[in-house]
Amino acid sequence: MRTIKNIAVLTSGGDSPGMNAGIRAVVRTGIYNDLNMFGVLRGYDGLVKGEIVPMDAKSVANIIQRGGTILKTARSEEFKTYEGRKQAYENIKTLGIDALVVIGGDGTFTGASKFIEEFDIPIIGMPGTIDNDLAGTDFTIGYDTAINTVVDAVDKIRDTAESHDRVFVIEVMGRDSGLIALRSGISTGAEAVLIPELTVDYDAIMKRLDKSRKNKSSRIIIVAEGDKEGGEVVADKIKENFPHYDVRLSILGHIQRGGRPSCMDRVLASRLGVASVEGLLEGRRGEMAGLICGQVQFTPFNKAIKHIDKINENLTRIVEILSL
Ligand code: F6P
């Protein structure tokens, strides 16, 4: 097993609340183990450009409660090319960096897998995305904060919807995943939730809206951004079917990615940060540290990026049963 003395950490892809808690945990675990720690700025872009800075215990002080990422993040086009990755390798070799911890989602792990394959660098991943769309962990870092942000916003929209007897179609984030929509839908009492993983049965939804007419003065339909049609089309279809409804569309957007991380996200990021560095020291590579049923587990990158089996159809059933 090779000796690891110098580790760099980076955040990549869309940011998520709790990434800072993760950076802090990685840096401090490294220092606790007498390693030299580095931070890469702007994800893989910084690796290609050589924007790599030393980090000590103080450089991660007072960040556990902050949203965003102090290391900044990017979706790097250069790192997708062999030349870019070769340049990145030269940069870390020059600094003597022997391993990486990457915090991000499927794009981050796909890039990491290629880098390991071509340049034999040990890399451990941490799941940092609000979408919760990774296998190998029950929850990703940032998901809990994001769904609580959505719940807060939808509760406020419900107040005005109720006052005006309106139907609100609310589009939430989730490019390929309905997990933000599903949990926030259940916890706000949404009348329907539309997600990319399942085919929408419009007839059933229209019937449900119509059936509940006498009981309700407001109706909320949550649509995941990645749904085949999206919030705008769904709102138009409801208007078409129910011309007497007063329908409004609200797209929550990037507010879902910001804010102070919840306690759950801070603890998750702290546990996985410690596990990532310890995993590297034990000789692990090419795996994501995740939490399954309360236990830290490692999942190979190629399995972690296949999230499709994650939709629990019981959750969609609950929406229907409780929307009477
Ligand atoms: O972080 C994932 C995500 O939130 C997706 O749900 C969304 O489609 C995407 O990021 C949008 O990110 P950006 O605006 O940074 O491209």
Image (tube, grey):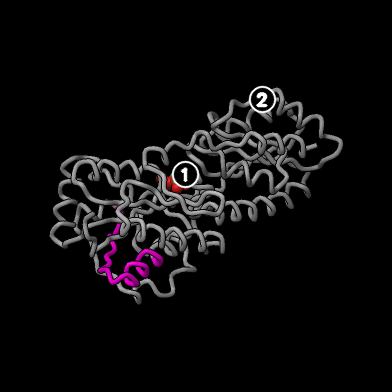
Q: Which residue lies furthest to the front in this view?
A: 1
Dot 2: few (<14), some (14–19), or many (≥20) neighbours within 10 Å? few
Residue 40 painted magenta: yes
Q: In this view, does 166 lie to the left or right of 180?
A: right
Q: Amino acid type of disc 2?
A: Tyr
> Which segment is the magenta one?
24-43
Q: Amino acid type of disc 1?
A: Gly
Q: Residue furthest bottom?
A: 58
Which is more foreground, mark 1 or mark 2?
1
Q: Is mark 2 on a helix, strand or loop?
A: helix
Q: Which of 153 and 263 is in front in this view?
A: 263
Which quadrant of the figure has residue 53? bottom left
Q: Mark 2 points at which residue?
A: 202
Q: Is residue 80 left or right of residue 303?
A: left
Give x and y (percent) for residue 260.
52, 64
Q: In which quarter of the image is ligand 1?
A: top left
Q: In this view, does 1 lie above or below 313?
A: below
Q: What count of labels does the image hold?
A: 2
User: If you read the primary sequence from the N terminus, does the residue marked by circle 1 or circle 2 appear first?
Assistant: 1
Give x and y (percent) for residue 236.
63, 30
Q: Residue at x 69, y 37 (%)?
A: 247
Quadrant of image for the C terminus: top right
Q: Residue at x 34, y 62 (%)?
A: 71
Q: How far apart are marks 1 and 2 (CA)?
A: 33 Å
Residue 45 painted magenta: no
Q: Which mark is residue 23?
A: none
Quadrant of image for the N terminus: bottom left
Q: Mark 1 points at which residue?
A: 136
Q: Which residue is drawn at 56% across and 42% down?
A: 179
Q: Which of 120 and 200 is in front in this view?
A: 120
